[in-house]
Amino acid sequence: MDKSRSDESRGGAAVSRRAVEAGLSALVRDNRFTVAVVFPLVGAALFVASREGLLPGWLAMNPALVLFGTLVMRLPLVAGLAPVVDRRAGLALLAVTAYSYAVEYVGVHYGVPYGEFSYRLELGPMVGGVPVGLPVFFLPLVVNAYLLVVLLLPRAGRLVRTLAALGVVVLIDLVLDPAAVGLGFWAYDGGGAYYGVPLSNFRGWLLSGLIAVSLVEWGFDREAVAARLAGCEFALDDLVSFVLLWGAMNVYFGNWVPVALAAGLAAGLVRTDRFDVAGLGRERPGRS
């Protein structure tokens, strides 16, 4: 009797999970253009308006608004990945989350491995100088890089896939950091040769990115991920949002190398049929 009830309970939980996943996928699919295009472009406009002094003080660079917008843009990644998150993948994501807090705390207080830097804006609640919402910013960068490589290099082995994903992670940071420094999100104490960012930052990302990508590679079943990507047109919409938002901000600051690198990311998305901006609001037949 107890075993029967336990089996029924597990079966009911599985059905509930599938229902939640289906509902979230439907929500994202029905609002693809709003989430993947409108939100990042409105975010870029608000950042520019904040810099130009066009917004009231309480609204300019409002941390709650920044965090809210980021969470909304993460929805496609969450909905796309949820069906392939089993116990092992969940452990990997928890490990990357814990690791991100640890490495950021060491970075803020000891300047290792990124170089001496500090947050100039509170990106939501802060504990020990580190944003509580850090995984919302860090984890998707790693996972998006991994998903893009799975699509671009479907036959690659584990080592090649890991190194390629690490390269994409560093590329993403080469786009992100200059604009974030320009906006005053954080700053490096001694400045840096790359739009105010020191080369030590990217050496640090090679280390932290390698560990994070390796954990993702360990945790996820590549075949299951590839199958999910083949049937989920919006799984990389979060990376589309990233390219639009941070590409636009680098244009605003005149950071042309990061703009070119953002265009390179866009080219990768186009190659995988994931930068179809005109079709973001349409459901593709046969996909679920």
Image (cartoon, rainbow, N blue to C red):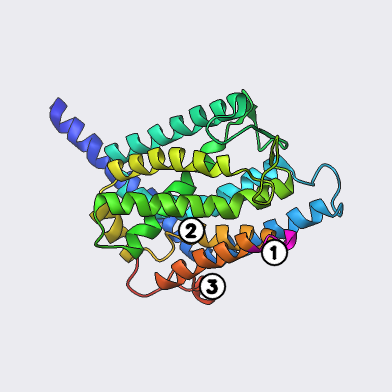
**Residue shown at 82%/42% (left/top)?**
58
Is 98 in front, or is 175? 175
**Residue shown at 79%/46% (left/top)?**
59
Dot in front, 1 or 2: 1
- For the residues marked 1 and 3, what is the alpha-carbon distance in whole angstroms? 19 Å
> Do residues under tags 1 and 2 come within 8 Å of each other at their CB atoms?
no
Kind of residue at badge 2: Leu
- For the residues marked 1 and 2, what is the alpha-carbon distance in whole angstroms? 31 Å
Observer able to see residue 39? no
The magenta-colored residue range is: 252-256
Q: Residue 157, labelled with which disc?
A: none
Looking at the image, residue 143 sits to the left or right of residue 117; the answer is left
Kind of residue at badge 1: Val
Dot in front, 1 or 3: 1
As for residue 223 lying within the magenta part, the answer is: no
Quadrant assignment for the N terminus: top left
Kindly identify which residue carries mark 3. Answer: 277
Observer able to see residue 40? yes
Is 268 in front, or is 11? 268
Kind of residue at badge 3: Val
Quarter location, residue 235: bottom left
Q: Residue 251, labelled with which disc?
A: 1
Q: Earlier in the sequence, mark 1 or mark 3?
A: 1
Task: Say what secondary structure mark 3 lies in.
Answer: helix
Kindly identify which residue carries mark 2. Answer: 27
